[in-house]
Image (tube, rainbow, N blue to C red):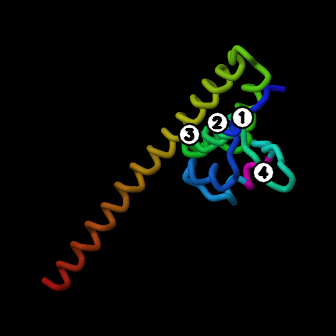
Amino acid sequence: MTTLDSTDLRGIQQMAEELGITQRTIRFYEDKGLIEPQRAGTTRVYTRREFARMQLILRGKSLGFSLRDIGDFLDLYDHDPAHIEQTHLLATRVSDRIAELEVQQSAIVQTLAELRLIERQALDRIRQVEG
């Protein structure tokens, strides 16, 4: 195991502040097994590795990936030093996510068109009645 100096370590409050999230969010991902802080007594101590993992988790969530997908990416990152397997999985999951979003986009465009039509019809009816 490598020796860490104090600049490599963060407490939960510092970690939360630097990431712009709550301590509860960090504990949530810890409970899910996605990060594993070290302990100094009862205090959680986070290394650069855990900080980087949290950044990846948050990025994955913002892109709409599930916790399972994110966990798979993180597991492969640890087990595949060249990151080839991870990159293949990432490309596949990103392609799937793009397809999902394109379906959603199409549905949104259709829903907006229907809502605009209903709005126009309602406004036309109001104008006719108030005439």
Secondary structure beneath label 3: helix
Whether residue 67 sits left or right of residue 14 in the image: it is right
Q: CA distance from mark 4 to mark 2?
A: 16 Å
| Helix, strand or loop under label 4 | strand
Query: Range of the magenta residues?
Result: 27-32
Residue at the image point whose x is 24% and y is 73% from the top? 123
Q: Residue under circle 4?
A: 44
Q: Residue furthest bottom?
A: 130
Upstream in sequence: badge 3 or badge 1: 1
Q: Residue at x 79, y 26 (%)?
A: 2
Instruction: Name the spot of residue 94 as percent of width and height, x first.
Output: 58, 30
Please name the residue shown 70% across and 34% down the image. 49
Q: CA distance from mark 2 to mark 3?
A: 27 Å
Which circle, 3 or 4, is nearer the viewer?
Answer: 4
Disc 1 or 2, which lies upstream in sequence?
1
Location of mark 2 (residue): 52
Element under disc 2? helix
Residue at which label 1 appears: 5
- What residue does disc 3 label? 100
Foreground: disc 4 or disc 1: 1
Query: Looking at this view, is 126 or 43 the one in front?
Result: 43
Nearest the viewer among 76 and 107 is 76
For marks 4 and 1, the one nearer the N-term is: 1
